[in-house]
């Protein structure tokens, strides 16, 4: 009987129960709805949200990332603050060092950075220590920021005449970083002394690459500068992570750029790519990361997954490096490079 058709005269009063929507279909369950694009998107979003509440594995020592790309507009600062927020929301203690005179990372994290505030500039000229300038981020527990002020704009010129000009940030962080699980240094879009200071202070380089035509422009020069720093100042520096940003799945060009980058850097590129998102663009104007501005947005979910991938990749490597390896009878060795005898 159709639902809208009244019962015949004299018929018993029958209560008709309308069928409920089977929510299992949106969770990859039964039926054909699981094969629709909307259902797949919903399933992925629900899975990402459920993972976001879980704690991330912490590294056994402080990991210091240099977030660099001399090409502007690739999402460098956005990546810095949102990856940092994702790691902090996963239970880690994270410090963002804003080394860009524009101070955009400081703005996005809503920390005070007007000209009278002690900042990373004061650390570089050794007026203050890191302990004296670091501020907590109010809306994310475990996240801290060393802010940048406009004074940093003249630091490049001042550092030229200073002793040990390339290692001033490294010395400042060396007495501070033991209290942090992660340090992310947001570099200016140039390869001057500020960026060199970051590369001397860090161990890992995180390169955001925009999924557009000019994505690889300047990347070769950045890699050459990294090699120069490795050769003369910091042999531990290496490119550990590449994140594809502003990915638009509707365009063939984005897929081509992503494929090319993954071909050249198969071990460094994260599986997660960050899509173009209005929410990501809006968040800084409200002095927030997208993680707090709209936690359920595609941009927030992508950065949260990228943070998880960064943490879990390292945890997997540390686990492998602790595997006891039998070298010969009666002796063992713990290491990642040895062969495990089955």
Image (spheres, rainbow, N blue to C red):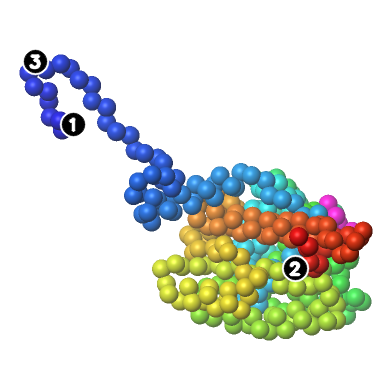
| Residue 178 on the magenta segment | yes
Residue located 59% across and 80% down the image: 216
Task: Report how far apart the C-alphas of labels 3 and 1 lie in the structure.
Answer: 18 Å
Residue 272 visible in the snapshot:
yes
Task: Report how far apart the C-alphas of labels 1 and 2 lie in the structure.
Answer: 64 Å
In this rendering, the label closer to the viewer, 2 or 3:
3
Mark 1 or mark 2: which comes first in sequence? 1
Residue located 36% across and 54% down the image: 36
The image's mark for residue 313 is: none
The image's mark for residue 204 is: 2
Image coords of residue 312 (percent x, y): 68, 56
Q: Tag 3: Cα neighbours inside 10 Å, few (<14), some, or many (≥20)? A: few
The image's mark for residue 3 is: 1
Does 312 appear above or below 337? above
Q: Is residue 9 or residue 180 the one in the foreground? A: 9
Q: Is residue 319 or residue 81 the one in the foreground? A: 319
Task: Report how far apart the C-alphas of labels 2 and 3 lie in the structure.
Answer: 81 Å
Question: Where's the N terminus, which quadrant?
Answer: top left
Q: Is residue 97 left or right of residue 167?
A: left
Q: Tag 1: Cα neighbours inside 10 Å, few (<14), some, or many (≥20)? A: few
Q: Which residue is mark 3?
A: 10
Q: Is residue 83 or residue 310 the one in the foreground? A: 310
Residue located 15% across and 33% down the image: 2
Instruction: Specify start and end residues of the magenta stretch as a single range.
Output: 175-179
Q: Secondary structure at mark 3?
A: loop
Q: Secondary structure at mark 1?
A: loop
Image coords of residue 207 (percent x, y): 65, 71
| Residue 308 on the magenta segment | no
């Amino acid at each position: 009987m159709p639902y809208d058709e009244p019962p015949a005269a004299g018929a018993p009063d029958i209560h008709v129960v309308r069928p409920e929507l089977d929510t299992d279909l949106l969770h990859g369950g039964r039926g054909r709805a699981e094969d629709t694009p909307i259902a797949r998107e919903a399933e992925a979003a629900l899975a990402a949200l459920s993972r976001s509440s879980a704690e991330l594995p912490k590294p056994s020592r402080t990991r210091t990332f240099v977030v660099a790309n001399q090409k502007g507009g690739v999402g460098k600062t956005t990546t810095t603050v949102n990856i940092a927020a994702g790691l902090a929301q996963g239970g880690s203690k994270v410090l963002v060092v804003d080394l860009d005179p524009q101070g955009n990372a400081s703005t996005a994290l809503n920390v005070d950075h007007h000209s009278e505030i002690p900042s990373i500039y004061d650390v570089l000229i050794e007026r203050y220590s890191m302990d004296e300038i670091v501020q907590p981020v109010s809306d994310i527990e475990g996240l801290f920021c060393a802010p940048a002020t406009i004074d940093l704009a003249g630091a490049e010129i001042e550092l030229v005449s200073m002793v040990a000009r390339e290692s001033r940030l490294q010395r400042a962080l060396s007495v501070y970083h033991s209290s942090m699980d992660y340090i992310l240094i947001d570099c200016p879009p140039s390869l001057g002394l500020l960026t060199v200071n970051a590369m001397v202070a860090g161990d890992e380089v995180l390169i955001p690459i925009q999924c557009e035509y000019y994505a690889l422009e300047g990347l070769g020069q950045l890699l050459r500068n990294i090699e120069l720093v490795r050769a003369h100042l910091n042999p531990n520096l290496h490119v550990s992570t590449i994140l594809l940003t502003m990915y638009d799945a509707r365009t063939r060009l984005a897929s081509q750029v992503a494929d090319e980058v993954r071909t050249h850097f198969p071990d460094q590129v994260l599986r997660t790519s960050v899509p173009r998102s209005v929410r990501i663009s809006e968040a800084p104007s409200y002095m927030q990361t997208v993680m707090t501005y709209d936690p359920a947005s595609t941009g927030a979910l992508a950065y949260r997954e990228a943070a998880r991938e960064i943490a879990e990749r390292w945890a997997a490597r540390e686990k492998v490096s602790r595997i006891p390896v039998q070298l010969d009878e009666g002796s063992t060795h713990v290491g990642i490079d040895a062969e495990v005898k089955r």
